[in-house]
Amino acid sequence: RLDDQEDDPGKDQEIDDRADEAAPGQHIGARRAGQVAQQARDDQRGHGRSDHSPAYLLDELAEDAERVARHVGLETFDVVGHSLGGQAALRLAWRLPDGVRRLVLEEMPPVALEEGQIAETMDLPLTPRRVWLGIKQVVQTPGALSRFDKTMMDSVSPQFQPDPAWWERLSATPQETLVISGGPRDFLRPEYLRLVADALPRGEYVELRGGHTVHRESSAAFARAVLDFLR
């Protein structure tokens, strides 16, 4: 699903979630005279209003995002990616080093550095807060879970096994990049996201409060951090 729009340069720009608020994806924006001139948002395949797919390769998610950018005629742009969409946004930056200007990675799960790290990083026990956030998501976006492809993780999870080549490529990423953590109250531990920021040549790290959906739970702080970085 493609969702593109022209924005009124005279209005304040709002950084919001993708086409479906609960769906990981990318928010792509071109800039004109220091302001956002055009934006494109997409639901990743298997999420929101996009179709399901036989497989969910991370590099193919980046190809999808590139097609969105080409479809709306963007040549140089910023990208904000949330969760799995952060992996797609990062790989899009690798594909288009001259096209992607700046990069924001919100709660992006990193590829493991060593065996056992995936469980330690992403598989914390169920907590009352996580139950509450899950219920809140269902109430706010009831269609998100029904449209989500439940088979996706069978395809995605093996791609997060230890891979030194991913970290080597990360260390050569040319774009200025902001890595955003939602804090220690959800399943992605901040220390691993800090490792990502430290590995990036032009990486910055900010820790907010709000968990994995920090853009929704701490929307004002998230918007300030992103807009300050992109200006």
Image (tube, helix red, strand yellow):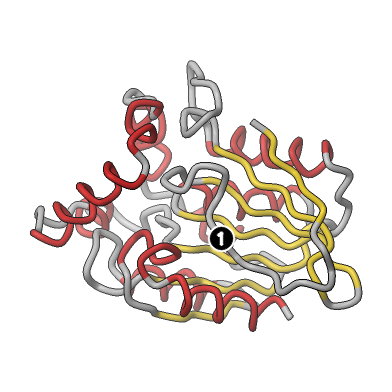
The residue tagged 1 is 16
Q: Amino acid at mark 1?
A: Asp
Residue drawn at x 30%, y 62% is: 188
Q: Quadrant of residue 68?
A: top right
Answer with left or right where residue 3 lies relative to residue 212.
Answer: right
Given residues 196 and 82, the one toward you in this image is 82
Which residue is more in the foreground, 112 or 135? Answer: 135
Quadrant of the snapshot with the C terminus = bottom right
Q: Position of residue 84 (x, y in %)?
A: 46, 47
137 with respect to 203 (left or right): left
| Local secondary structure at mark 1 | loop
Residue lying farthest top? Answer: 54
User: Residue shown at 40%/71% (left/top)?
Assistant: 181
Q: Is residue 98 above or below residue 200?
A: above
Left or right placement of residue 177 versus residue 134 in this view? right
Q: Position of residue 30 (x, y in %)?
A: 81, 60
Relative placement, left or right, of 185 versus 230 is left
Question: Which of these two is toward me, 102 or 42?
Answer: 42
Residue 13 x/y as whole percent: 69, 70
Q: Quadrant of the N terminus?
A: top right
Residue 157 at what x, y percent from top left? Answer: 35, 37
Which residue: 56% across, 49% down? 18
- At x 40%, y 35%, the residue is 156
